Image (cartoon, helix red, strand yellow):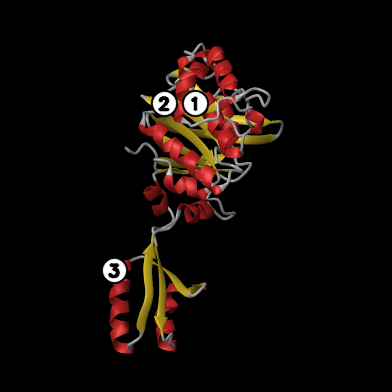
Amino acid sequence: MNAIVAKNLTKRYGEFTAVDGISFEVKRGEIFAFLGPNGAGKTTTVRMLTGLTPIDEGEAYVNGHNVKTEKRKVKASIGVVQEVSNLYDELTVEENLRFMAELYGAPVENVKGLIEEFQLPAKKKFGKLSGGFKRRTVIAAALVHDPPVLFLDEPTKALDVRSARQVREMIGILNKRGKTVFLTTHIMAEAEKLPHRIAIINRGRIVAVGKRSELRKLIGGKVRVRIMVEPLSTKFLHFLDPYNPHFDGEYLVIDVDDVDSFLEEFAGLKTSLGFRVLHISTELPSIEDVFLELTSEGSSEKPSLCGGCPL
């Protein structure tokens, strides 16, 4: 059974449609990322799925429970980490976690375990913590009742590089223990490393769903080649003309459909011209490349769905 099912979810604020009839499924035990620019509808979707914002149209199920009619069962089976903390600055870390445990009727023993696991300063007031420790405490609070599904809304936003990496590592560990993670982000590093599948949302609509490899194919699957040769001759530049080369720093960069054929031609040209190869490397399109193409002004409105794929 899927952990999350959304069917034609819609949310309007007056004449503005924040989420426009989106549908997707999240498998149990996977990390599923909602990738989109600010204002795309990511947070609104999370709020609908977690019962914090009413659904105007469509249906949603979390852990088999109907979000509209079984809100208590939904909330009991999920942990939610919102972009803005819901903990109390004047309480210590331990007091905050104990309070959350009491709200959920969870064993107090869970608090001690989370403090140790997340290496939290138990006696320090929440308001005095660094950004990284605050985020770790908020995630711990969302896990105090041991829910099977965790919603994380922009979990590393405004964190420094080290703290963001620690939070990402923490998410990976939780997932390996069986937690289903629904993650919203606009940070490409998270989209490249964390999720099993990604949904790209733009202007309230999902434009693509799938694994990273599947999303890359949607923009043609070209391979990017970076080259540095010496000397850089006119004949060599003419050879690259069909590939529309451009400079990226000291490298010449091209995109090719068939990298094997290109490398064969490149090797033959090296023999005939006698240049030295200082650098050559290949890379697949990044998730950032996919994201920019699929959310550009000229991109198609019609969703490209490659969801439902096995992990």
What is the secondary structure assignment of the residue under circle 2?
strand
Q: Position of residue 153 (x, y in %)?
A: 56, 35
Kindly identify which residue carries mark 1: 115
Residue 3's mark?
Answer: 2
Residue 173 seen in the current view? yes
Q: Is residue 14 above or below residue 253?
A: above
Give the amino acid type for the residue marked by disc 1 in the picture. Answer: Ile
Mark 3 or mark 2: whose residue is earlier in sequence: 2
What is the secondary structure assignment of the residue under circle 1?
helix
Q: Are marks 3 and 1 in contact (CB under 8 Å)?
A: no
* Quadrant of image for the C terminus: top left
Give the amino acid type for the residue marked by disc 2 in the picture. Answer: Ala
Mark 3 or mark 1: whose residue is earlier in sequence: 1
Q: Is residue 228 above or below residue 14?
A: below
Kindly identify which residue carries mark 3: 260
Mark 1 or mark 2: whose residue is earlier in sequence: 2
Q: Nearer the viewer, mark 3 or mark 1?
A: 1
| For residue 70, side relative to residue 216 (left or right) | right
